[in-house]
Each structure stands twice: as C-alpha cells, then as structure tokens.
Amino acid sequence: ALTLTQLVRRPWLVGTLGLNVVALWHSYSRSAWLAATATLPILWIHIPHRHRRLAAFGGIACLLLATIITMAQLNKYPALQESLLHSPASHHQNPASSDSLRLTSIVDGLEAVAGSPLGHGFGSAGPATFQANQPFIIENQFLQIAYETGWLGLVAFGAGLGFLIWSLWVGPCQPVGKAIALALAAISFAGLMLPTFSDSTTTLIAFILAGLAIGEDTYVKT
C-alpha cells in the first residue's frame, strides 16, 4: 500500500512493487490476493483525468485476458490448481471441501444473525469458541460481529472503522496515513471470507500503526 501511494511520484518503485507481487503470490493466500485488490484504487486517484478512460479499458482488458488464460490452463496443470484452489478442481464438487464449508458457515451465520438481531453476546462465535462444546466459526468477520453484538453493534463497528479509515486518508500524516488506510481497507475486504479482526497479527500491526498516525496528526494540530 505504501509503495502504491508513492508509485506515481517515484516510478523506480515499480521494482519494489514487483517483489511485493512475487511475495504475495508465494503466500498462497487467496484472501490476501483479494485484499491486495482493495489497495489498487490509489492508482486510479493519481492517474490524470485525461488518461483514466484508457487506463480503465486497459485494466479491464488485462483482467479479462488473465482470467481467460487462467481458466483455460487450470485443468491442465495440477500445480496451478493447488495454487489457486488449494486442491484439485474435482474436489470442489465435494460438499465437505474447505470452500464449501466456508460458504456453509456464512449461510449459517446469516441465518443466525437474522434470527437474533440483538446478538448472542461477546465470545459466542469465532476463535473464542474453539474450546467450547459446540464451536461456532463464521468465515466472515462482519457476520461474526453481528452474531455477537447484534445489528446495532455491526453498524457501530462499521461506522467506527469507516471513520478511522477516512481520518487516516485525509489526515496530515501522509503518505503513511493513506497507506495505513488502504491496509485497513484491504483487511476489511479479506474479512468478507475470513475473521480477519479476530486473531490476526497483521491486523494488530495495522491498528497500532493507525494509532501512531492518528496520534501524530493530533500532535501536529496542537
């Protein structure tokens, strides 16, 4: 995220960005790949208006081409299946596969949240229930928050997180503020398929950096 905020001003950072892409690919984390896409809007902001249409068409064309090539080669190369699907393509028809169970947990979470708008209490879902008689894991951070604290708790959490990201984006501590805002946005995006705020060291570091940046902003203003 920090590289992207400086890429337009310092084009030589493209080499560093390439290293980041290589590291991201070898993480074999699909949630991390999805989260990384949440940081890309920073490039759009820095593109001159006269070039945005061309950039949009070029980006869409590259995405479609990459998708077509990947889908065409997916069944031919087991290594590619393992990297993208974490198992052979045929295994994804199995209702007990990790992806199927993840979707099932999200559906169960939606039903539970809809049936109890006031929530079930703190620690009633997620990693805190691993030692319980009936662990309840929801593979969606926002559904887990709604399950524990109710609809009002989810709205309060979303509003607080949104205000934090906005404060970092417009604050005077730049470009670090924008980089941290993008990191939190990426973590939130990954939270659609994982409980990223529950037990993630990356999330803790991001919030620590956010606190430091906000504190620096406050110090500058005073």
Image: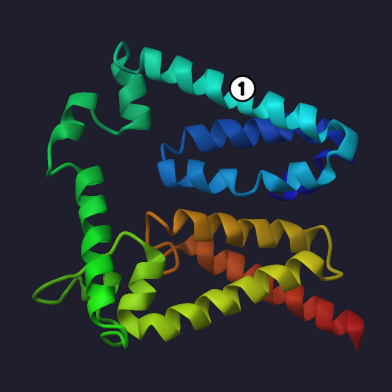
Instruction: Using the image, determine if residue 214 lies above or below residue 101.
Output: below
Of residue 134 and residue 131, the one placed in the foreground of this image is: 134
Question: What is the quadrant of the C terminus in the image?
Answer: bottom right
Q: Which residue is drawn at 27% across and 75% down?
A: 114
Indicate the position of residue 59 as horizontal and vertical percent values.
66, 28
What is the quadrant of residue 105 in the picture? bottom left
What is the quadrant of residue 138 in the picture? bottom left
Crowd class of label 1 (few under 14; some 14 to 19; many from 20; radius 10 Å): few
Residue 48 visible: no
Residue 112 visible: yes
Indicate the position of residue 82 as horizontal and vertical percent values.
31, 27
Indicate the position of residue 122 as horizontal and vertical percent values.
32, 86
Instruction: Using the image, determine if residue 147 lies above or below residue 189.
Output: below
Of residue 222 and residue 161, the one placed in the foreground of this image is: 161
Q: Pointer 1: what residue?
A: 62
Label 1 sits on what residue type? Cys
Q: Which residue is drawn at 57% across and 30% down?
A: 22
Please give left or right for residue 80 compared with residue 125 in the image.
Answer: right
Instruction: Using the image, determine if residue 16 lies above or below residue 61.
Output: below
Of residue 70 and residue 195, the one placed in the foreground of this image is: 70
